[in-house]
Image (cartoon, rainbow, N blue to C red):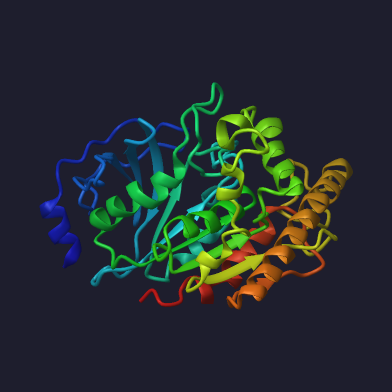
């Protein structure tokens, strides 16, 4: 069996403390090549076995000189090399109150029988998963394009013995980022799922979204990211302006129109707050989430128009209902699976 070969080849595995509040690991050897490294020297610092086919890797990024946890779900059948799906979290990076794919959705259960490696980073809060031009006093050093395109893939490919084919999906802030990551290194990601994101970043509307995310919600300084509004880095990192580089990538783009939908009724498990029937919580969920999502829908229509101009095929799911919340992102992942799984096996 391939697992046994990898175990035999693996370097010693260090089981460390939990970190990031992610729960206690089960101390046992992991069926991966933990000696895997990236060309720049990034490496796996430790491996934790968290349950059946579930691992937590602590990966050191040379570009950021920091270590980050990755949640990994292994395929049920690993007798042959399998592809990888990278799930990217939104604004808080999965650090903010366990607001992550792993904690807020049944994505991992849905993917459990798909025979695909699932990799989810916990980190990168309010960064747009971009390479920032300067360190930030609050958000630190951010070199996420480098991490996702140069450091992490070779580590994952070598550690898990993948077939080298990848998909990537993200929601909210990451709905913008996954498009830019695919543009940064064409061909790295065969398929992209972008949910409730705003692809445009360099026009006044897009800049306002980015600045609000980084500064108002994240406490960071957007000047450390791409500079003042007239800095060309804003255009460099605009997926709409560089949409031509998405040619050949299978795309699924989704956003709700902002009107209340099936996940916005009182008592729905995806209503924000502990009391799902609290009128204030429901109103906040519907009004705030509706306004944000309506803006994301407008952005997604703009991307659709641009791709149509370029003759680049893509699947768009842009209904009039749906707010900026987990229930719809869970649905988006499932609905987009035919695209996310294309050309991988």
Residue 25 in the image, given as x and y percentages of width and height: 35, 40
| Quarter of the rendering occupied by the C terminus | bottom left
- Vertical placement of residue 169 versus 345, above or below: above
The one nearer the camera, 184 or 341, is 184
| Quarter of the rendering occupied by the N terminus | bottom left
Residue extending furthest toward the top: 137
Residue 115 as seen in the image, left or right of residue 226: left
Residue plotted at (55% across, 37% down): 125
Picture quarter containing residue 272? top right
Q: Does residue 287 appear in the picture of this structure?
A: yes
Residue 174 as seen in the image, left or right of residue 212: left
Residue 317 in the image, given as x and y percentages of width and height: 69, 71
Residue 147 as seen in the image, left or right of residue 262: left
Residue plotted at (77% across, 61% down): 322
Residue 130 in the image, given as x and y percentages of width and height: 51, 43
Residue plotted at (84% across, 44% down): 284
Picture quarter containing residue 268? bottom right
The one nearer the camera, 272 or 116, is 116
Picture quarter containing residue 315? bottom right
Residue 241 in the image, given as x and y percentages of width and height: 61, 58
Q: Does residue 50 appear in the picture of this structure?
A: no
């Amino acid at each position: 069996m391939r697992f046994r070969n990898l175990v035999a080849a693996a370097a010693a595995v260090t089981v460390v403390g939990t970190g990031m509040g992610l729960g206690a690991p089960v101390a046992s050897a992991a069926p991966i090549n933990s000696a895997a490294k990236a060309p720049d020297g990034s490496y796996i610092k430790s491996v934790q076995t968290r349950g059946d086919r579930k691992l937590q890797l602590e990966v050191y990024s040379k570009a950021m000189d920091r270590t980050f946890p990755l949640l990994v779900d292994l395929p049920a059948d690993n007798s042959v090399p399998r592809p990888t799906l990278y799930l990217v979290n939104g604004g808080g990076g999965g650090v903010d109150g366990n607001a992550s794919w792993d904690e807020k959705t049944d994505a991992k259960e849905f993917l459990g029988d798909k025979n695909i490696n699932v990799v989810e980073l916990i980190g990168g809060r309010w960064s747009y998963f971009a390479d920032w031009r300067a360190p930030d006093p609050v958000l630190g050093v951010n070199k996420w394009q480098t991490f996702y395109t140069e450091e992490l893939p070779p580590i994952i490919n070598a550690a898990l013995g993948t077939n080298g084919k990848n998909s990537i999906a993200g929601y909210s802030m990451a709905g913008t980022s996954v498009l830019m990551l695919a543009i940064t290194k064409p061909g790295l990601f065969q398929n992209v799922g972008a949910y409730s994101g705003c692809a445009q970043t360099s026009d006044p509307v897009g800049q306002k979204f980015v600045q609000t995310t980084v500064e108002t919600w994240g406490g960071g300084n957007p000047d450390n990211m791409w500079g003042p509004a007239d800095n060309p880095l804003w255009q460099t990192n605009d997926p709409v302006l560089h949409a031509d580089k998405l040619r050949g990538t299978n795309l699924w783009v989704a956003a709700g129109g902002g009107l209340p939908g099936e996940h916005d009724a009182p008592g729905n498990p995806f209503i924000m707050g502990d009391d799902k029937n609290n009128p204030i919580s429901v109103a906040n969920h519907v009004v705030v989430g509706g306004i944000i999502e309506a803006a994301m829908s407008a952005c997604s229509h703009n991307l659709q128009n641009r791709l149509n101009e370029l003759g680049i095929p893509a699947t768009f799911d842009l209904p009039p209902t749906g707010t900026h919340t987990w229930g719809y992102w869970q649905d988006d992942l499932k609905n987009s699976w035919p695209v996310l799984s294309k050309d991988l096996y």
